[in-house]
Amino acid sequence: MIELKNVSKHYKQTEALKNVSLSLKPGQIVGILGPNGSGKTTLIKILNGLLRDYSGEVLIENQGIGVHSKSLISYLPDQTYLANWMTGEKAIDLFKDMYSDFDESRMRDLLSKLKLDSKQSIKTMSKGMKERFQLALVMSRKAKIYILDEPIGGVDPAARELILNTILDNYATDSLVIISTHIISEIEQIFDTVVFLKEGEVVLCDDVDQIRSTHNKSIDELFKEIFKC
Amino acid sequence: MLIKLIKHDIKSSYRDLFPLYMGLLLFAVIAAVSVNPEREWLSVVTILPFFALFIATTVILTLTVIKLFTNRLYSKEGYLTFTLPVTTLETFLSKIITATLWTLLTFIVYVLATTLFAGLWVTLNWTNVQYALNEYRSFWEVIPWNTLIPEVLRFMGISLPQAIMSFVYSSALMLITVVFVNTSYVTSKKLAIGIIVYLVLNFIFNNLYTNIFTDWFVYKENYGFEINWLMYFLDFLYFGLISVGLITLAVWLNDHKLELE
């Protein structure tokens, strides 16, 4: 479903990604794991067409980044993208108009579960409310690919559980879910596959059960071992 | 999809402009009703806000257009704008069409407000108008009204497509500047570089224009004018081709060099 072949990306003198090659299949939850600055967000921005100047090849359903790939991906960035002029209803209208796979009834259901009011303006929402609203929008699409960049970064443990449950309850099992994070312990049980990124390079990409049996360690323990300072 | 994008772009900006349009039309009526030579203070109190609203609307329109090409494209909103399943060309055309629509609508509101003010004022102060006409009869009689009004209307009709093209050209220039500073070519001092790029490009295209073309309209006696139709079409073609070229380049740059922060 997603193929990356020798993808490299430079920012000035910094090499953010070095010859990254990956093949990700549908029907699994993939964790992109690495410390801050390891290239997770760069990789995700490339997949979403927000960074276009890179070398190598990126294919999504055998096509390059474009209208088709964007129609397949439901993307949650690591920051709020909803504008202050919007109300929740206007954001819902936008998603309804733009994405044929947007399920409005699921959205309404998620809003009540997440205790959000769609009539409230984005401007008056707290940071946490904006993040939850955005998550609801993203998970209300019946997308083939979900890409969630640090969905539990910077939230308290109670909210983390709510966010993880929202993700797990709403993705289609035949879709591909990519979650980037540097907080492993609370999320590792949901991954089928993990990709360890270190200074822009893939140092490990394998099935979670395989890793556990080979290394006889949890993903969190292995992560700490590989990335210890 | 283009229509849907335009709809959402209009939704993003109508709250800034509509209250001003309403205010302009309302104050056109209030100002016209309150103009009275015997109560000058009242005239000042109502006419000043009326003119202040013209200035405010122009400023807010300018800011709205700038925001369409900056905040709506490349700030945090870019994470949404550039992940929508639409082509880059559709995204850019939506901004240009929305900006042009707001500019046209603002112009129409200006004309309406002025006409409303003048019409009401003349109607309500007919005695004063007659007095003024008598006082300045010689001045009024010099103006060939029968010729002037149709000529002004003709000029407005002929120059409207040029004005729209000129606005599209300015929008395309703003677009290429904003797109350029958000590519991997520019990593710092984006605002300064953007202003320089805009000014340099505008200088080049305008100088090229003045060196190649002559004016497409020529003033004649008695408020008349003539149109040099060849120059008129060449002028239209020149700015049209530059706009198409700039938009095409902006799409290419965005699709190959975009670097959203």
Image (cartoon, coloured by chain):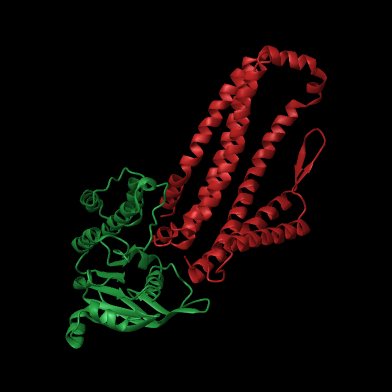
Question: How far across and down, in percent of the image, does residue A16 sit?
Answer: 44, 77
In the rendered image, which quarter contains the N terminus of chain B? Answer: bottom left
Q: Colour of chain A?
A: green
Vertically, is A63 above or below B179? below
Taking the view exactly as shown, the residue that stands out farthest to the bottom is A214
Query: How many badges with numbers are in the image?
Result: 0
- Taking depth in this image into account, of B169 and B22 the one nearest to the observer is B22
Q: Quadrant of residue B59?
A: top right
Taking the view exactly as shown, the residue that stands out farthest to the front is A229
Q: Which chain is red?
A: B
- Residue at 62%, 19% (x, y): give it: B42
Q: Quick check: A208 left or right of B89?
A: left
Vertically, is B244 above or below A190? above
Judge whether residue B228 can be spotted in this image: yes
- Taking depth in this image into account, of B258 and B234 the one nearest to the observer is B258
Question: How far across and down, in percent of the image, does residue B90 sit?
Answer: 47, 58
Vertically, is A195 above or below B132? below
- Residue at 23%, 69% (x, y): give it: A187
Q: Quick check: A113 left or right of B187?
A: left
- Residue at 69%, 15% (x, y): give it: B37
Question: How far across and down, in percent of the image, does residue B219 sit?
Answer: 79, 41
Vertically, is A195 above or below B120? below
Q: Quick check: B137 left or right of A5?
A: right
Q: Quick check: B108 left or right of B226?
A: left
Q: Quadrant of residue B48?
A: top right
Question: How far across and down, in percent of the image, does residue A47 sit?
Answer: 38, 71
